Amino acid sequence: MRRILLVALLLVLGCRSQPPEPRDMNTLDMEGRTWIDPLTGEAFTGPYESYYENGDVYERGTFKDGRFEGPFETFYDNGQLYRKSAFKIWTQAELEEQRPRTRLDGPYESYFEDGRLWTKGIFEDGAECGAWFEDGENVTHPACVRS
């Protein structure tokens, strides 16, 4: 009985779907404001990475319906983290008003090439808000609306 349970457990664990591998942005096409998977002709949804010429990761993040959305990280060419934050997609109505395609939204951090903190704060719909640390100084922007 134990063997049957062990085999069943291994089958269940082995059959769980793995997260998709990040897609190289160089394999996608851009049509207007949308990143398209040329293999399907559809707007790409899923993780992406872009690379320096030497093959090191420049940026990683996620697309939703062909646009940047969610957390992302950008790196210096020495592999050190440059910045991390998240993108938020504009609504269709906002896009029709010709606003930019994406905006920063949520916690934001950026670093010097040697790893020291450069800036840290919060973006709300593309605008800095609340308390920030910027290049060694504490700065206060208008209060964040969301908490």
Image (cartoon, rainbow, N blue to C red):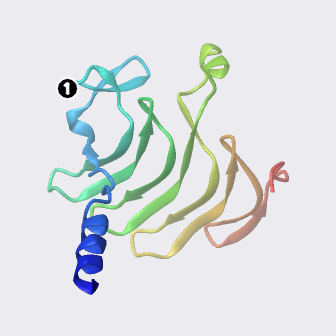
Please give left or right for residue 66 compared with residue 58 in the image. Answer: right
**Residue at point 26%, 44% (across, down):** 23
SS for dot 1: loop
* Quarter of the figure that contains the N terminus: bottom left
Does residue 80 appear in the picture of this structure? yes
Residue 74 to residue 67: above or below: below
**Pick the front one: 87 or 4:** 4
**Residue at point 81%, 57% (across, down):** 147
Please give left or right for residue 86 compared with residue 143 in the image. Answer: left
Residue 107 percent location from the top left of the image = 63, 59
Please give left or right for residue 115 compared with residue 89 in the image. Answer: left
In the picture as drawn, the residue positioned furthest to the left comes out as 54
**Pick the front one: 5 or 86:** 5
**Pick the front one: 44 or 20:** 20
Q: Amino acid at mark 1?
A: Leu
**Residue at point 24%, 23% (across, down):** 40
Density class for disc 1 (Cα within 10 Å; few <14, some 14-19, many ≥20) is: few
**Pick the front one: 70 or 127:** 70
Give residue 12's quadrant in the image: bottom left
Residue 84 percent location from the top left of the image = 50, 59
**Residue at point 84%, 51% (across, down):** 142
Does residue 78 appear in the picture of this structure? no
Label count reads 1
**Residue annotated with mark 1:** 39
Give residue 29's quadrant in the image: top left
